[in-house]
Amino acid sequence: MSEPPPETMDRRTQLAADRTMLAAERTYAAWMRTGLAAMASGVGARSLLKGVIPAWSIRALGTTLILFSAFSFVAAVWREVNPGPPPPWPDLRRLPRWILLAINTVLLIATLAMLAGIWAR
């Protein structure tokens, strides 16, 4: 981590750094919501569309949604780990990156297991 700012730093700059950090966390949360929704949709498509459309199209749709879910989880971590140039020292503490990596790894493994489940039947 970088060093704390000098005492001469303007308070507005500090607040802008806090807003930037909170915006990054909201972006992470948006990627996670999108990934979870795509995962649920991919699994639900199989159950809801069975007997309505051909089996190959159900698998294709489910596979597409689940792969998009995996992409969302990877993109969430990518955006969190590589945010761009660091803002000035914020007052707020960030969530530890290892927690975010652990959560996303578990979700990615679950996503791949669901993909295998779609193709198994």
Image (cartoon, helix red, strand yellow):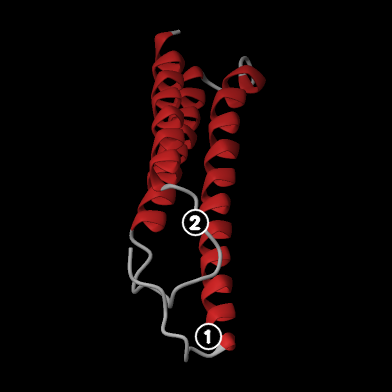
Q: Residues within 10 Å of mark 2 (few under 14, many from 20)?
A: few
Q: Position of residue 81 (x, y in %)?
A: 35, 55
Q: Residue at x 42, y 75 (%)?
A: 87
Nearer to us in this view, 105 or 117: 105
Residue type at the position of mark 1: Thr
Q: Position of residue 31 (x, y in %)?
A: 52, 50
Q: Which mark is residue 45?
A: none
Q: Give the vertical position of 86 relative to 109 (above or below).
A: below
Nearer to us in this view, 60 or 19: 19
CA distance for labels 2 and 1: 17 Å
Q: Give the vertical position of 69 relative to 93 (above or below).
A: above
Q: Secondary structure at mark 1?
A: helix
* Quadrant in which residue 25 is drawn: bottom right
Nearer to us in this view, 107 or 37: 107
Residue type at the position of mark 2: Arg
Nearer to us in this view, 112 or 28: 28
Q: Which mark is residue 13?
A: 1
Q: Secondary structure at mark 2?
A: loop
> On the rendered image, what quadrant is the C terminus found in?
top left
Q: Position of residue 71 (x, y in %)?
A: 40, 43
Q: Farthest residue in the top direction?
A: 121
Q: Which residue is mark 2?
A: 94
